[in-house]
Image (tube, rainbow, N blue to C red):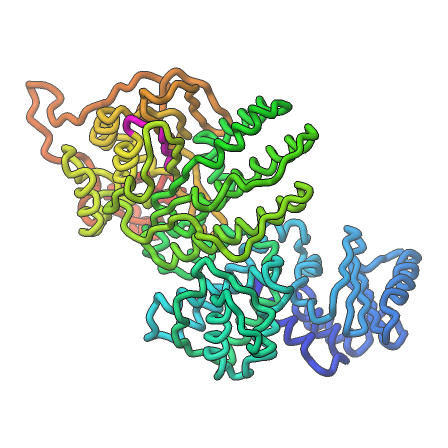
Amino acid sequence: MSITDYEDKIKKIVEKEDHGQFIYDFLSVYEKISKATITKLRKGSNNLSKVPGEVYLKNKLFFKETKGRVMQTYSDLEDRIDEIKSKPRYIVVTDYKQLLAKDIKTGDTLDIKFMELPRYFDFFLAWNGIEKADFERENPADLKAAERFAKFFDVISSDNGDVDRHGLNLFLIRFLFCLFAEDTGIFKQDLFTDFLKKITSPDGSDMNDRLSELFSFMDKKERSGDEPAWLSDFPYVNGQLFTEPHMHIEFSAKSRKLMIDAGELIGWSKVNPDILGSMLQAVASEDRRSHFGMHYTSVPNIMKVIKPLFLDNLREDFERARGNEDKLTKLYERIGNIKFMDPACGSGNFLVIAYKELRQLEIDIIRELNGMRIATMYIPSVTLNQFYGIEIDDFACDVTRLSLWIAEHQMNRRLEEEVHNAVRPTLPLQKAGAIVCGNSLRLDWEEILPHGRDDEVYLFGNPPYLGARKQSKDQKDDIKSVCGNMKGFNSLDYIAGWFVKGARYIRSSNARYAFVTTNSINQGEQVSILWSELYRKNSDIIFAYQSFKWGNNAKNNAQVTVSIVGVADEEYFSGDKFLFFNDSQKKVENINPYLSEGENVIVELQKKRNDFLPAMNFGSMPNDGGNLLFDAQEYESLSESTKKYCRKYMGSSEFINGISRYCL
């Protein structure tokens, strides 16, 4: 079963007015406890306790219901369990208002309201042979939220098939903000979910009107004081999140229930802002997910880009500045002046992680100054105004802004926890960076983020990659608009456009960039086409990760083989260069376009091997439309006499994914 299936089934059980069958219904949710076992338990034949209100299933459970005195009953039951040789895995005590439980094997305990049980279904997963620690590693709160959001998205989209997509997307962004806000201290706890439960009709008929009132109210700075009581606790938000009027949306009993479930069953305070990228992948079409932004990138992979690009240097400067007020102050001022841009930002994963890392460095500097007993009044250094992004999908742009707001709030709370008397309020929201919706290859990056020669600017991200033969006409036109003056540009991968624009942007300046890329631009004919142009623009590779598998936590995660390439202007870079491979790194004198240590030698494309042989008209490739290729199943169906004419076929896709194919 999926995460949401567990939660939904248990929610129905705890909401029953009659709790007489509770424990049997609860056990039945866990598939590894057979129906036959539960039937016998109901009849009492395998209940090892004969005390009314107790259920003792060997090796599984000791359950006791009580009227009040839950803690005392729980304590008494613990004492009894100590004397039993064959101990149950769990003990559970409840008066159907409060529930206490203990995992005898791990010692973990649970003390919750009875109605909160659906959120803690994973505590009892040992009944299914799954240890909770293993489940949390494989199913973090991020994925739980993504799954439930995707279910809601499907229902609300189906109910509003003809509605303007922008209006629906804007509602979803506002909905997500409210869920985060009520669980992270921006709103009062459960304020939004309680509004849904108490103020809207069960059939959802008035949901649109109530939401329209609420969203409009949260955009009002001046309050009259005569607003309805249910509105008065909601704060002024700003940030233009609620400025645009709410568009009419149809709601049903089902969509209303899913909204309430999202508030009640998910601990949004445990969800990282970068979950929103995963959510988008879960609901986007396969084509958009494969080709255009909206990639969810895991934090470790993002760190492979930003650490060697700028973060390692900043952290090293911090270590050298420890104990020195002047150096710490200069570093504090420096990090407030750096600019960052992701020119294919998707739903903002790179920007969010970069922002949080920079805010953490800001906090560490303040703590170091305070530790030196230097009276330091906290003045914010790092702000969202330093972060820029370009994204072709307007929904993803909105999610990027939302993600940055949430990241800011999380770091504000961390600041208050780690630095005495430092307060940085989240509301009213400030502008969430300069996130531009548009085609990155058609926009002027310098207009979006102007920079001088000595300004510290870093571009980074995971732009879309798509082979030349898989590009649409519009994509080919995009490449032509950037690379049209380059001989052979029609053979370039789509991502090459970002490298060329990046090279133009950083030329004759201190700016640098690093992109995750398909390794095709560092192999074969593309090297001479692309890198000859980049070297003419004074570009120099300052670090690189050789080919590795790039995965993430998104739905239907597919690993691809990629490289990471960091580039600076040769005249403005004098630091060390590093080549990363497997789990090691090597300091090198130079990194060539093939991402190897050595001089910048480029192998040019030649059609003639020598003067005595004719020119080659067409290279060797399976360009017959796939008619001469067979998959493993087709190959096995061939007769033995035919198989001798077939040979094992190994291309890049087959090698990377371990696929068996054959050719005639």
Q: Does 509 appear in magenta? A: yes
Counting every numbered tag in the picture gives 0
Residue sitting at x 79%, y 79%: 43
Q: Quadrant of residue 126?
A: bottom right
Where is residue 524? Give x, y as percent: 25, 30
Residue 468 in the image: above or below residue 606? below
The magenta segment is 507-515
Q: Residue at image x 55%, y 83%?
A: 202
Considering the image in quadrants, where does the N terminus appear?
bottom right
Please tell me which residue lies in front, 430 or 592.
430
User: Is residue 128 part of the magenta span, yes or no?
Assistant: no
Q: Is residue 647 visible?
A: no
Relative horizontal placement of residue 407, taking residue 492 as reference (left or right): right
User: Position of 422 compared to 471: left or right?
Assistant: right
The residue depicted at 63 percent of the width and 67 percent of the height is: 190
620 w.r.t. 81: above or below:
above
Residue 234 in percent (x, y) is at 57, 68
Q: With respect to residue 653, does 157 lie above or below?
A: below
Could you say where residue 400 lies in the image, as x and y percent from the top left?
43, 52
Q: Kindly tell me whether residue 12 is visible in this rendering.
A: yes
Q: Quadrant of the C terminus?
A: top left
In this view of the protein, which residue sits in the foreground, 326 or 36? 326
**Percent coordinates x, y for residue 47 in the rendering:** 83, 71
